Image (cartoon, grey):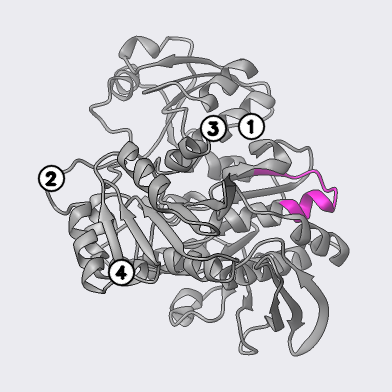
């Protein structure tokens, strides 16, 4: 396998450079004086930003984009052998790396690399930890799967030995990572277009944990039923966090302020430590924050920086993000696209002042919607009003497996006011007529459903 060397910048071409993770890697290499070219199916603000930094990017993918001066090609999991650029690279016998392989190699340039894994909460936790490291002024390099205001995007290039990134389980891409510290937030059934079921997913996370060195540390959710399966036969150090004293790090005296933000006393091995004040809501974010405190302690970050970082972190974009207010209606956007995430968002919303609770949900991929159909219906029934829009296909093709109308009908059977609309415009018109004073409206999903709230707000 080709090995990248930061001390010898080369010409790297990215097939699918506009993705949030691919663009982040391209930006890091740009700032390390690499020559960057790439292509994407469509233009975007991300693409424009990379071009402003010096990348040469083509909109549309064709064999002619693969020029003779390219030294290395990086591609995403969505790119297959029938892609014209991929085929041209193979014909030219160019060195090729997947996005995950490149990220794994880049991590090797940092002594204190941290990989944040888990079915849910990766972006929020990576962002939390990033905020702590920024408060501690250790000049970290950061790659996060969302937009973080404090770094003005999804990437920050530092000059120290600290590196923080997300580690996604899809297609086992994180198996290419060999970090110093790994976080496993949770393990749930997801990406069932790739995994056969929960047992294969558990085994995948175990393999990820096995990549840690003997002097490395696994920071893991101690409340999981599969904990022993994940941690079996590991050579590294293991530190647990959870909601009870069965874990080493856990909360006590949990309180919610008038804005729905969480506060708790940090407990470590039965001893009470500082009071932790979060600037976001949700029990799940207590868990996320605990994992970052463990990592900070391992890295020797002072507790004052930890407290300051967590108290000023207001969430990553699209994670229970306040978009604005339309009259007396509050509009929130959230990335939740799995039943477990929907339940967590519902809990957070319940502790947020409101009259009635609305959700516009855009299911993400046909396989996920079909595989977790009943779980989605059960999770969504807790809202006062549910609006379904068409399933966001992402990497899939609609074969008639399932339709959003089917999910809407199932939720109605629970007695929840539920409607399906085939267009965003129809949704917007309905909401304008029916949302009342002090209602809370959440646009939810991993696709482009956020555009509904933005259109209502005139953004």
For discs 1 and 2, the disc positioned in front in the rendered view:
2
Residue 207 visible here: no
How far apart are the two marked residues, 2 and 3, measured between alpha carbons?
Answer: 34 Å
Residues rendered magenta in the picture: 131-142
> Contact (CB < 8 A) between labels 1 and 2?
no
In this orientation, which residue lies closer to the viewer: 281 or 101?
Answer: 281
Residue positioned most to the left = 400
Q: Which mark is residue 339?
A: none
Give the residue drawn at x 77%, y 52%.
133
What is the quadrant of the C terminus in the image?
A: top right
The reply to whether discs 4 and 2 touch (Cβ–Cβ < 8 Å) is no
Percent across and percent down for residue 233 are 50, 77
Question: What SS does tag 1 mark?
Answer: helix
Q: Is mark 2 on a helix, strand or loop?
A: loop
Residue that label 4 marks: 416
Label 1 close to label 4 by CB (< 8 Å): no
How much space separates mark 1 and mark 3, taking CA atoms?
A: 30 Å
Residue denoted by label 1: 28
Residue 270 percent location from the top left of the image: 75, 90
Q: In this view, does 150 lie above or below 39?
A: below
Residue shown at 78% from the left, 68% from the top: 297
Residue 134 is left or right of residue 207, and the answer is right
Q: Residues within 10 Å of mark 3 (few under 14, many from 20)?
A: few
Residue 150 is inside the magenta segment: no
Q: Mark 3 points at which residue?
A: 459
Distance from disc 4 to disc 3, alpha carbons, whole Å, reads 30 Å
Compared to residue 227, the image places residue 407 above or below, namely above
Q: Where is residue 382 in the image (x, y as percent from the top left)?
A: 39, 71
From this view, report whether residue 416 is shown above or below residue 391. Answer: below
Of the numbered discs 1 and 2, the one sitting upstream in the chain is 1
Q: Earlier in the sequence, mark 4 or mark 3?
A: 4
Q: Badge 1: how crowded within 10 Å, few (<14), some, or many (20+)?
A: some
């Amino acid at each position: 396998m080709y090995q990248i060397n930061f001390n010898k910048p080369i010409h790297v071409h990215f097939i699918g450079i506009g993705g949030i993770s691919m663009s982040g890697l391209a930006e890091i290499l740009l700032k390390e004086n690499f020559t960057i070219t790439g292509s994407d199916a469509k233009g975007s603000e991300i693409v424009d930003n990379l071009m402003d930094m010096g990348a040469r990017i083509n909109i549309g993918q064709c064999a002619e984009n693969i020029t003779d001066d390219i030294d290395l090609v990086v591609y995403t999991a969505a790119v297959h052998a029938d892609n014209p650029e991929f085929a041209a690279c193979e014909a030219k016998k160019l060195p090729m790396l997947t996005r995950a392989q490149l990220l794994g190699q880049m991590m090797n340039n940092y002594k204190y690399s941290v990989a944040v894994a888990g079915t849910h909460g990766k972006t929020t936790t990576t962002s939390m930890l990033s905020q702590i490291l920024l408060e501690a002024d250790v000049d970290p390099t950061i790659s996060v799967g969302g937009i973080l205001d404090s770094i003005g995007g999804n990437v920050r290039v530092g000059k120290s030995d600290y590196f923080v990134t997300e580690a996604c389980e899809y297609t086992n891409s994180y198996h290419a990572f060999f970090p110093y510290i790994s976080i496993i937030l949770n393990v749930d059934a997801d990406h069932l277009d790739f995994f056969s079921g929960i047992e294969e997913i558990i085994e995948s996370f175990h393999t990820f944990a096995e990549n840690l060195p003997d002097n490395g540390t696994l920071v893991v959710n101690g409340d999981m039923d599969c904990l022993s399966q994940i941690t079996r036969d590991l050579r590294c150090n293991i530190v647990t966090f959870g909601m009870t004293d069965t874990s080493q790090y856990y909360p006590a005296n949990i309180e919610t302020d008038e804005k729905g933000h969480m506060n708790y006393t940090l407990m470590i091995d039965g001893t009470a430590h500082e009071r932790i004040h979060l600037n976001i809501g949700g029990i799940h974010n207590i868990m996320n924050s605990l994992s970052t405190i463990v990592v900070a302690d391992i890295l020797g970050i002072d507790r004052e920086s930890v407290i300051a970082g967590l108290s000023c972190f207001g969430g990553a974009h699209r994670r229970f993000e306040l978009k604005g207010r339309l009259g007396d209606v509050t509009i929130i956007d959230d990335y939740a696209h799995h039943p477990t995430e929907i339940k967590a968002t519902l809990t957070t919303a319940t502790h947020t002042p409101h009259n009635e609770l609305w959700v516009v949900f855009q299911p993400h991929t046909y396989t996920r919607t079909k595989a977790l159909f009943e779980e989605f219906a059960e999770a969504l029934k807790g809202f006062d009003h549910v609006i379904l829009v068409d399933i966001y296909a992402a990497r899939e093709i609609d074969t008639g497996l399932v339709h959003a109308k089917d999910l809407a009908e199932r939720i109605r059977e629970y007695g929840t006011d539920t409607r399906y609309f085939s267009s965003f415009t129809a949704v917007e018109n309905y909401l304008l007529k029916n949302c009342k004073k002090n209602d809370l409206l959440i646009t939810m999903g991993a696709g482009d459903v956020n555009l509904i709230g933005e259109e209502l707000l005139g953004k």
